[in-house]
Amino acid sequence: MQSATTTLAVLAALVATAAPAGAQQGGQTPPGNEQRLIANAMSAAPRAVAEKATVAAIDDKGRMTTLRKGAGNFTCLPDNPTTPGNDPMCLDQNAVAWAQAWMSRSTPPQGKVGFGYMLQGGSDASNTDPFASAPTAGDKWVETGPHVMIFNAPGILEGYPVQATDTRVPYVMWNGTPYAHLMIPVGEPSRANASQGK
């Protein structure tokens, strides 16, 4: 089992190009923002998970600040301000390993099914290109309401839509790549949630 320090180091690599709202260079969080960031990060998962999770914020240089050390198997991150929606996330340690492979463009670990929460929803630049930072000309962001994700489980993907034409039903993100994973909606999209904090 990975240590919390290793998990946080991996998450730092995962979001090295994105700074959560309020994070400052040098890994410092301005006074008064820490509790807001923690609350935003915790909103990604059910209370029983979020209360035990480690919470970390990443600045625009990829430097990590541990806002709260946890005792659980999950690490939560606040909203990524480079996307249009409010999209905090909580990932278990296997999902973090998947994310590390994605960021390093290497093959995700086999036999380690990962799980993640995004109960505020999420915005993705592309459902086909794992490395897109913005939609291509004429396309729009893929908006998914509250959902959970299953990583490193290729056997369960068959039969699910591979197009994100209706994100209110389960679908496969990044089909045909080593990073394909199942997106499972758990609630209706909310425009209020999607625009919160932006």
Image (tube, grey):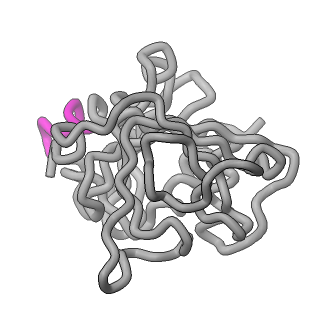
Residue drawn 24% across and 37% down?
Answer: 190
Say if 99 sits above or below 184 in the image: below
Q: Residue furthest bottom?
A: 137
Queried whether the magenta region covers residue 165, the answer comes back as no
43 with respect to 127 (left or right):
left
Compare residues 121 and 25 and report the one nearer the observer. Answer: 121
Q: How many marks?
A: 0
Q: Is residue 26 visible?
A: no
The magenta stretch is 30-37
Residue drawn 33% across and 43% down?
Answer: 78
Residue 40: give x, y in percent of width and height: 28, 35
Residue 124: give x, y in percent of width and height: 41, 61
Say if 15 sits above or below 116 in the image: below
Residue 183: give x, y in percent of width and height: 56, 45
Say if 159 sits above or below 59 in the image: above
Queried whether the magenta region covers residue 34, the answer comes back as yes
48 with respect to 86 (left or right):
right
Q: Is residue 168 visible?
A: yes
Picture quadrant of residue 91 = top right
Residue 143: give x, y in percent of width and height: 35, 53
Residue drawn 34% across and 76% down?
Answer: 139
Q: Quadrant of the N terminus?
A: top right
Compare residues 56 and 110 and report the one nearer the observer. Answer: 110
